[in-house]
Image: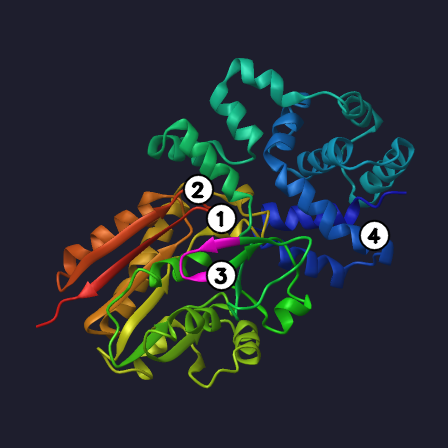
Amino acid sequence: MINFVPEFLVLKECKKRKVSFQEACFKIKTTTTISSSHLKKLAYNTKIILSHYFSLNYETFYLFPDIKKDSSESIFISLLLGHLHYLEEDEKEIKEGFLDAIKTLRLSLSVDELNICLKRKDEDMISRVKIEDEKKYLSLRFELPLSLLSLLLSQYDKKGALSVIKNLHGKENHLYLKNKDQKINHPKLKEENVFLMPSYIGKIENSNPLIKDKVLLKADYLPLKALSNISSFYGVTSVLLCNLYDYFLPDCIYLLLKNKTSLQIQTFIKNSLLYRKAVNYNTNKKISFISAPIEMIKTYIDPKDKSIVLISGCSNLLDNMIDPSILCKFEIDDVEKEKKKNLYRLFSTHCFVNEGGYLVYYNHSPLRKCNEEVIDEFLKTKDEFIKVKEENIDDSYPLPKGYYCILQRNKR
């Protein structure tokens, strides 16, 4: 019998309480009794449902127009439809699991609703929408909010918007070769030439010996791409990494820049777990770590102390790659909040750039409000900085979309 209850509870936590997918799964695993076989399926099944939540939710209200929005019954129907459309399961087991779940959860559903859903098992609901409303069709086809789709279509042409949308569900798969004279033979990896470092494209786990033994390095492409465009290094180059979320990155930065200059990298990390991972992974003595948020950097570092300050912008859309519940909770007001937060990060860290040094901002959001508009507003009040280069990464790269901007402090 299929156990719908823990999956329903995960979806409810994500949708109604707005916690992350990982937090929801952890809570249900630790607060409910669940067999080991169901435990293995819990994360996989709920990820599938969340990644198709918009089309499933649309179908729920098409079949049951009187059902209350965001009610427990609507969430459960979407879960049921997800099992019918995307998970190959026995119909008898689905029926048994349905009856057990509505009893346990005390839902006002019956066999009548189940039978209506069963009849839809092999029907494509989305294709019918295409004829009626193309924008709604694209929203359902690519599983993202209509408000976000409208924003993207106002910023890009249709082809560009679709390219961005596809990347919202993707993951970066670039790996960088530490020893350029070495060759990698691996069935899942393909050699690729990217800017200054030899690299490979492919999906392998962090536990793979190639990663564990640092034969290949994994890191975010955007900051490395930005740094590869800075050519004027001098003496000892001191780099400040703020709000680090990629613990592989410092080692990759050192690999990228070490032949250009004498290098020191100082890294601030707010998350304590990420801090421990970074310290354990990056054993290079030229790389140091401090567990502190942006607000505390000024207690450790003097103004105008660094040659390069690297700051990442926040983007919920980036988080969707690892948390499939993000898009389900997207609200248009989130964009303005992200813009303010990114501006705050720039204003909090620009003071550490020395004269002639660089402030590098990068962000995986495809939205101008979180990228170009942030830089423009920053420069309105900080005229001691000039824009050296900015770039939107286009779809010629097998990577998520992104933006970076290099600013330089004027020399007096």
**At label 4, which amino acid type do we have?**
His
Q: Earlier in the sequence, mark 3 or mark 4?
A: 4
For the stretch drawn in magenta, the main secondary structure is strand
Q: Is residue 263 left or right of residue 83?
A: left
When the figure is inspected, residue 111 is found, relative to residue 39, above or below; the finding is: above
4 or 1: mark nearer the eye: 1
Toward the viewer: 411 or 144?
A: 411
What range of the chain is rendered magenta?
Answer: 192-198
3 or 1: mark nearer the eye: 3
What is the spatial separation of the Cα atoms under label 2 and label 1, in whole angstroms? Answer: 9 Å
Residue 240 in sight in this render? yes
When the figure is inspected, residue 294 is found, relative to residue 184, above or below; the finding is: below
What is the spatial separation of the Cα atoms under label 4 and label 1, in whole angstroms? Answer: 34 Å
Toward the viewer: 162 or 230?
A: 230
Residue 396, numbered label: 2
Q: Earlier in the sequence, mark 3 or mark 1?
A: 3
Residue 38, numbered label: 4
2 or 1: mark nearer the eye: 2
**At label 1, which amino acid type do we have?**
Leu
**At label 2, which amino acid type do we have?**
Ser
Q: Disc 3 marks which residue? A: 198
Residue at (29% x, 69% y) in the render: 349
| Element type at mark 4 | helix
